[in-house]
Amino acid sequence: MQHARRIGDMGRLALLAYCEVRRWARQAGEPELADRSTELITRHPYASRDQFMEQIDDLILALEQAHSRVTGQHAPQ
């Protein structure tokens, strides 16, 4: 996701958020993160590209934090 975010590939970000993040979160026992990734794509029309990207940034941060909880490692700063 971070690579797609750096290059601004909105289509790939939407695909990753909806398919990969949701699947990983469910398997990792993080249902709130799974729901958040679903809502990001299916329930919110965004007024602008910037608004969508802000939500993606928040999702990436939440994903890093969830990964840290699951693996017991600290998230990168």
Image (tube, rainbow, N blue to C red):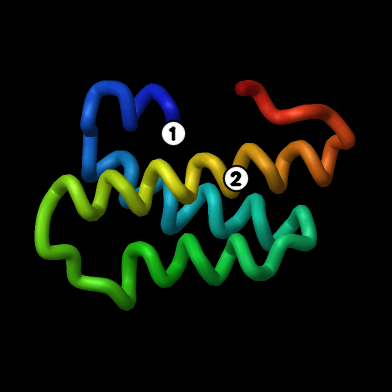
Tell me if label 1 and label 2 are in contact, CB under 8 Å.
yes
Tally of marks: 2
User: Sequence order check: which comes first, mark 1 or mark 2?
Assistant: 1
Q: Is residue 50 left or right of residue 39?
A: left
Identify the residue position indicated by label 2 in the image: 63
76 vs 29: above or below: above
Instruction: Residue at the far front: name it.
Output: 77
Instruction: Residue at the far left: name it.
Output: 48
The residue at 19%/71% (across/down) is: 45
Q: Which is nearer the eye, 11 or 44?
A: 44
The residue at 25%/53% (across/down) is: 52
Crowd band around label 1 with a 10 angstrom C-alpha radius: few (<14), some (14–19), many (20+) = some
Crowd band around label 2 with a 10 angstrom C-alpha radius: few (<14), some (14–19), many (20+) = many
Q: Which amino acid does the dot numbered 2 rest on?
A: Leu
The residue at 47%/61% (across/down) is: 37
Q: CA distance from mark 1 to mark 2?
A: 10 Å
